[in-house]
Image (cartoon, helix red, strand yellow):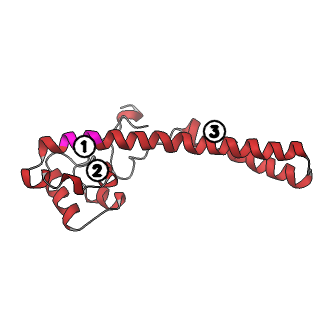
Amino acid sequence: MSPSTKPQNLANHSRYVPGFHFFTGALVMANLVWSLRHLYFNRTGAAVDLVVIALCLMGLFWYTRAFSVAVQDRVIRLEEQLRFARLLPADLLARMDEFTPSQLVALRFASDAELPDLCRRVLADRITERGEIKKMVKQWRPDYMRA
């Protein structure tokens, strides 16, 4: 079984891309540290420029990930609204607007069979933390197409 189709669960569902998260992230961070150190020992305009560039790279690194996750969450919200329309009973469908985007993102891992009961519980107990909701999922529905 390839890594992308390895059975998913709460413990292993996070996605890390080593080249981005660890290699590029470490380089961007090391560049910032080096630039700050260089500025400390060499107070020149060029050293300030290096720090500004390092901060720009850090911002690009951070926001590249943040923006893609935001778009992914919007797509998940739409997918889950369509799924809810197919699977939830009328009384829960009437409460669809009560779900937060974060709740919808977490509920995507619930199997079709357990979704109605889990939705009812999330609304009744006002559970908003993604981690809490994910822990309640008994039959994990994997998501292999993640950003």
Looking at the rendered image, the disc whose residue lies closer to the viewer, 1 or 3, is: 1
Tag 3, which secondary structure?
Answer: helix
The amino acid marked with disc number 1 is: Glu
Q: Residue 76: horizontal and vertical position, in percent?
A: 32, 41
Residue that badge 2 annotates? 104
Alpha carbons under labels 1 and 3: distance apart: 33 Å
Instruction: Looking at the picture, tell me which residue is in the foreground, 140 or 6.
Output: 140
- Residue 118 location in percent, x, y? 19, 57
Magenta residues, start to end: 78-83
Q: Report which residue position mark 3 lands on.
A: 24
- Say whether residue 64 is left or right of residue 34: left
The Cα atoms of the two marked residues, 3 and 2, are separated by 31 Å
Q: Which residue is mark 1?
A: 80
Q: Which mark is residue 110?
A: none
> x, y (%) of residue 142?
30, 41
Nearest the viewer among 102 and 140 is 102
Q: Main secondary structure of the magenta part?
A: helix
Q: Amino acid at mark 2?
A: Leu
State the quadrant of the N terminus: top left
